[in-house]
């Protein structure tokens, strides 16, 4: 490609609404242009990156035996009504009507449609396993779209769906996809982690997220530096303490703590470690009748150490919480504690409730909690003597750096990541809802076992930029760069020698199949270099009249601080070596 024939539209400054680095740089480099809230035009430079991501994904999916198809962006509501998701999903599901008043959705995902395909096409166990995938536009009506392609409303995603005869083969299909994803992300040239993820209401352990490591990532990734253990925060287990509860050594005392409603403030006031305090979280679960009306509510008191935070996913899996939970109302809190939040505790309750203690709290002695009276806390609190033993002891907290690794191979560390892929075992959730069956070896109908596997195609370039950039702009890995090599001839319009050398190298690289662009726009050197450093092309060759007289050109990798002089006769071999050709 010649730059004069391409569209290069760089900006000195990013738009005011661009927040994160990737959004700013993609806008400045002309990769995307905003059309509406969370909706972007993929400009030629950005589309080249997206197409390279798609090509890698497609190649590895095909190698793994998946079959490509395309399902409509606009889907009939009837299929979504079969699974109940038409009503259950919130406003992020864009619902529309056609001219006849029939309901449709603009799909955020395609489980219903692909299950409908499977139930029509797959009749016998002999046709299984099958894996269908697409690379298609999706739409989720985010309440607050932000961060450019990181959280847009319209996006491109690769979604795949496996169908199997039983759980054993379904797990095999899952592993094939998990292995394919590792190959895909290895080829992207990004630093990533595959982390165990919570599998939600489906249960089981077959769920992994693929996270690109970036300091600006929204997700906390838990891992052990000395082993292969990795999980997201929701999934990571906080092991039970090895020590047992000590004997009480302090008397129960009501202590004045005026204006100190947080564990941090109380610990500071009393000059004690934060981990000697206990925070009280009040939740409620509701029992509903057939009409969906609340007929009974149960109030729960969750006790966590003052330096720990509640993990809502773990709490949602506790006995009694399976139907969901909410934070207790002001009235419920007053009925049970007779006090406003900030000074709550399990001592001297007005009404009985159920107490759940985190594992670390369960082994504490002489701890501090709210006194159920404004401006007072209780010190020297002990289970058995001052408070009844908890109704349940469980892991209900987020892990912290330094906790023991669940695999016993060291301690945990935490870093930030951006989720760009997810592999997930679905089971028969959709096949049962939509009666997608096949005849087994005995001629009996069975529900198909399913898995789903997604990659955020347009999110991935943004994640790559968050991980790879500097003060000058983006730094693309070779595999997904818009162009792999840029040739920058200086004053080509004034020197036939420069023009001839630039075009010769350009033609030689094209002959090798290299994705090269020749900047023949006639820009000043400073402006030309600034454009390509902003755009982030990984390899640059600069050709100037002075250098040619000395028999050299300059090569510079985007990550290099300085250029390297290379003999004209050796430049092609030098670039080939840098590209691994």
Image (tube, rainbow, N blue to C red):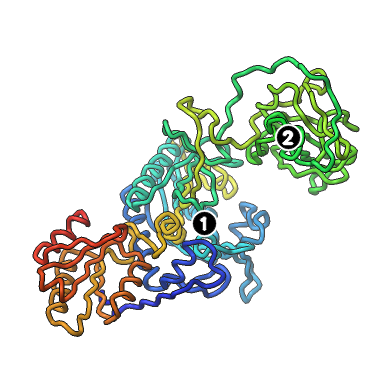
Q: Is residue 451 above or below residue 500?
A: above
The one nearer the camera, 57 or 410, is 410
Q: Quadrant of the C terminus?
A: bottom left
Quadrant position of residue 9: bottom left
Q: Earlier in the sequence, mark 1 or mark 2?
A: 1
**Which label is found at residue 267?**
2
Report which residue position mark 1 lands on. Answer: 110
Q: Residues within 10 Å of mark 2 (few under 14, many from 20)?
A: some
Residue at (35, 50) in percent of width and height: 184
Task: Label 1, secondary structure: give it.
Answer: loop
- Say whether residue 260 is visible: yes
Residue at (37, 53) in percent of width and height: 67
Task: Label 2, secondary structure: give it.
Answer: helix
Quadrant position of residue 500: bottom left
How many numbered marks have been drawn onto this rendered protein structure? Answer: 2
Q: Quadrant of the N terminus?
A: bottom left
Q: Is residue 132 above or below residue 29?
A: above
The location of residue 29, given as percent across then percent down, is 41, 71
Asked whether, in this view, residue 169 is left or right of residue 99, the answer is: left
Q: Residues within 10 Å of mark 1 (few under 14, many from 20)?
A: many
The location of residue 491, given as percent across then percent down, is 22, 80
Q: Is residue 253 above or below residue 144?
A: above
Residue at (70, 23) in percent of width and height: 364
From this viewpoint, which residue is outermost toward the top? 247
């Amino acid at each position: 490609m010649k730059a004069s024939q391409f569209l290069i539209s760089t900006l000195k400054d990013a738009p005011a609404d661009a927040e994160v680095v990737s959004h700013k740089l993609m806008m400045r480099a002309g990769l995307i242009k905003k059309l509406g809230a969370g909706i972007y035009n993929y400009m030629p430079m950005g589309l080249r990156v997206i197409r390279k991501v798609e090509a890698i994904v497609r190649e590895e999916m095909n190698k793994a035996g998946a079959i490509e198809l395309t399902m409509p962006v606009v889907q009939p509501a009837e299929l979504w009504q079969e699974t109940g998701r038409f009503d259950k999903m919130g406003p992020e599901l864009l619902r529309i009507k056609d001219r006849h008043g029939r309901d449709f959705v603009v799909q955020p995902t395609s489980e219903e449609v692909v299950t409908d395909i499977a139930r029509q096409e797959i009749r016998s166990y002999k046709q299984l396993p099958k894996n269908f995938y697409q690379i298609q536009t999706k739409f989720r009506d985010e309440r607050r779209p932000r961060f450019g392609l990181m959280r847009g409303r319209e996006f491109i995603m690769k979604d795949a769906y496996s169908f199997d005869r039983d759980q054993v083969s379904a797990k095999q299909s899952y592993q094939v996809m998990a292995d394919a994803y590792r190959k895909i992300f290895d080829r992207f040239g990004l630093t990533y982690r595959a982390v165990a993820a919570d599998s939600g209401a489906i249960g089981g352990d077959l769920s992994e997220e693929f996270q690109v490591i970036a300091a600006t990532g929204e997700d906390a990734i838990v891992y052990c530096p000395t082993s292969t253990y990795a999980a997201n925060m929701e999934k990571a287990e906080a092991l039970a303490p090895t020590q047992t509860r000590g004997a009480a050594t302090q008397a129960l005392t009501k202590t004045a703590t005026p204006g100190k409603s947080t564990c941090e403030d109380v610990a500071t006031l009393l000059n004690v470690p934060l981990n000697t305090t206990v925070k009280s979280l009040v939740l409620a679960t509701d029992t509903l009748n057939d009409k969906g009306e609340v007929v009974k509510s149960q109030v729960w008191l969750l006790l966590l150490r003052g330096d720990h935070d509640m993990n809502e996913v773990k709490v949602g899996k506790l006995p009694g919480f399976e139907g969901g939970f909410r934070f207790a109302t002001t009235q419920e809190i007053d009925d049970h504690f007779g006090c406003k939040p900030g000074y709550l505790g399990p001592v001297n309750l007005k009404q009985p409730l159920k107490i759940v203690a985190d594992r670390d709290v369960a082994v504490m002695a002489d701890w501090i909690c709210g006194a159920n009276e404004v401006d007072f806390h209780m010190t020297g609190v002990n289970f058995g003597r001052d408070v009844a033993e908890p109704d349940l002891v469980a892991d209900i907290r987020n892990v912290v750096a330094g906790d023991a690794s669940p695999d016993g191979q060291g301690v945990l560390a935490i870093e930030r990541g951006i989720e760009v892929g997810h592999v997930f075992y679905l089971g028969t959730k959709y096949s049962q809802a939509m009666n997608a069956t096949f005849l087994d070896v005995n001629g009996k109908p069975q529900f198909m076992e399913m898995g789903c596997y997604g990659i955020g195609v347009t999110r991935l370039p943004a994640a790559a930029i968050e991980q790879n950039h500097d003060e000058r702009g983006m730094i693309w890995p070779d595999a997904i760069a818009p162009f792999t090599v840029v040739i920058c001839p200086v004053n080509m319009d004034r020197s036939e020698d420069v023009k001839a050398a630039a075009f010769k190298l350009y033609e030689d690289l094209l002959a090798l199949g290299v994705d090269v662009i020749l900047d023949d726009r006639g820009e000043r050197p400073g402006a030309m270099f600034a454009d390509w450093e902003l755009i982030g092309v990984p390899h640059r060759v600069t050709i100037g009249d002075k250098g040619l007289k000395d028999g050299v050109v300059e090569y510079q990798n985007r990550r290099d601080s300085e250029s390297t002089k290379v003999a004209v006769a050796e430049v092609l071999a030098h670039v080939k070596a840098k590209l691994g050709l």
